[in-house]
Amino acid sequence: MSHSQSNSAAVSVQVRGLRRSYNGQEVLKGLDFEVKPGEIFVIMGPSGSGKSVLLKHIIGLEIPDAGEILINDESIQSPGVMEKHRMAMVFQSGALLNSLTVGENVGLYLSEHQLLAPADIGRVVSEKLEVVGLKGTEDKMPNELSGGMKKRVAIARALVVEPQLILYDEPTSELDPLSAVVIGEEILKLKDRVHVTTIVVSHDRDLAFGVADRIAVINDGRIVSIGTPEEIKHISDPLIRKFLTADFKRPDSR
Amino acid sequence: MVLLFWRTLLALPLAWRQREKVYDQLFEIGNASLLMVCILSFFIGGVIALQTGPVLVERGLTSAVGGLVGISIAKELAPVMMSILIAGRIGSAMAAEIGSMRVYQEIDALRTMNINPIHYLVLPRITAIALAVPLLVIFSILAGWLGGAAVSAANGRIDIAFQAFFQNLREIVGLREVANGVFKSFCFALVVGVVSCHQGLITIGGPRGIGRSVTKAVVNSIVLIVILDYALTRLLLK
């Protein structure tokens, strides 16, 4: 595409000693991990364990109290590093701009940075919406879409950036199982098609084991374990076992 | 708030790029406020004439009615009352819209796309309000004068003809007085725009947080308008 930049290779991400407190309460307690270029890295953990906060730090929306995040070995705090690499985030809620149509939302990055002529933006928007199975929805408003459709539009909006790193915050939350499978497939397709580095934050076990190259389990602001899905499945740590095997039991069941 | 104003000033050269959003906001402000501004101003002018006219006429100061109504509308009531009205109507809407965008992560989404929220959200709104309010105040002054003249002509205790009212008004109120009021309204518009956008951008929490931001935007705007009014009046006093 004409707006593509020469640097399109997937990036590596290193998180070193990341700490962050809010109102005296430490949410991230010294996180260390590395994501390899082109990898799908899933961060799992219970609600409130600091997963979403971690993502916000990686994309530069939050500044850590201590530690650093490196993209291709360069700190994101260094001037120009965030601008040098194309990154996108798919928010839990989709975070579509409610005052704009679906088409305007998807093409926002291109129109605001004046990267393409309006006609070309329309073509790119159609292409990206087709990728996520929503062709022809350009003129709809976000409030006319279901939760699953909003997330797919958010993915299309992220694709327009042609990201080297894409972050997903709870991509399957509030979705029915079928929509969740569609989103999981989209994440896998994207990796195959554009070789993007992917970090997914989720507590959806099916999604994590379905798409991940590696999984990190986080609890109470700390990494408990990192490994391939097979390695994580066979870890004997009681906390991980409990998280992976938790199931609803009826009070009268034996 | 001062930092936001400064950053918006620095971004001013980009206003042309955001012109479509400025037009949208101008239409929003004008369309929402023009009729109300004219109706309110007409009756405010009428009330001033009704309150002061009989007293002045009884003391033989008939020729002062037009001037008094004219100058109080142009220099004080139109800019202050209309700016307070705009704070309630437009400032609250700005704080609510930006506040809900903040709460529902739309502003975070903009930042992840390297879109500066000040350029995208604040600049068009402040530019539009700074252009629209002085224009609305010109309409307000004219409507206020008309209201004063209509009441002066219709009320038996005042009984000043339309033409005599305006002739008297012209003797006291010149372009300088009108410019004085319009300049004040421009300053008040900046206050409403900056306070409301700032409150929107610092919104935290859910719907209750948005409600709090809206209230703060309106109350803080009104307080600052009244304080600034005193300062500007002292400054612009001949």
Image (spheres, rainbow, N blue to C red):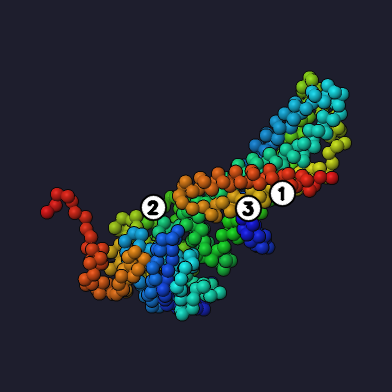
Q: Chain of mark 1?
A: B
Residue A118 vs residue B102, the one in the foreground: B102
Q: Residues within 10 Å of mark 1 (few under 14, many from 20)?
A: many
Q: Amino acid at mark 2?
A: Ser
Q: Position of residue A171 (x, y in %)?
A: 37, 61
Q: Residues within 10 Å of mark 2 (few under 14, many from 20)?
A: few
- In the image, taking residue A132 as reference, residue B93 lies left or right, namely right
Q: Amino acid at mark 1?
A: Phe
Looking at the rendered structure, whether the residues under marks 2 and 1 are on a common chain is answered as no
Q: Position of residue B228 (x, y in %)?
A: 70, 47
Q: Amino acid at mark 3?
A: Val
At 68% from the left and 34% from the top, the residue drawn is B40
Residue A146 bears which disc, if any?
2
Q: Is residue B144 visible?
A: yes
Q: Position of residue B161 (x, y in %)?
A: 83, 26
Residue B219 bears which disc, if any?
none
Question: Tag 1 or tag 3, which sits nearer the N-term?
Answer: 1
Mark pair 3, 1: CA separation: 12 Å
Q: Farthest residue toward the top?
A: B156
- In the image, taking residue B88 as reference, residue A143 lies left or right, namely left
Mark 2 residue element: loop
Residue carrying label 3: B194
Residue B210 vs residue B2, the one in the foreground: B2
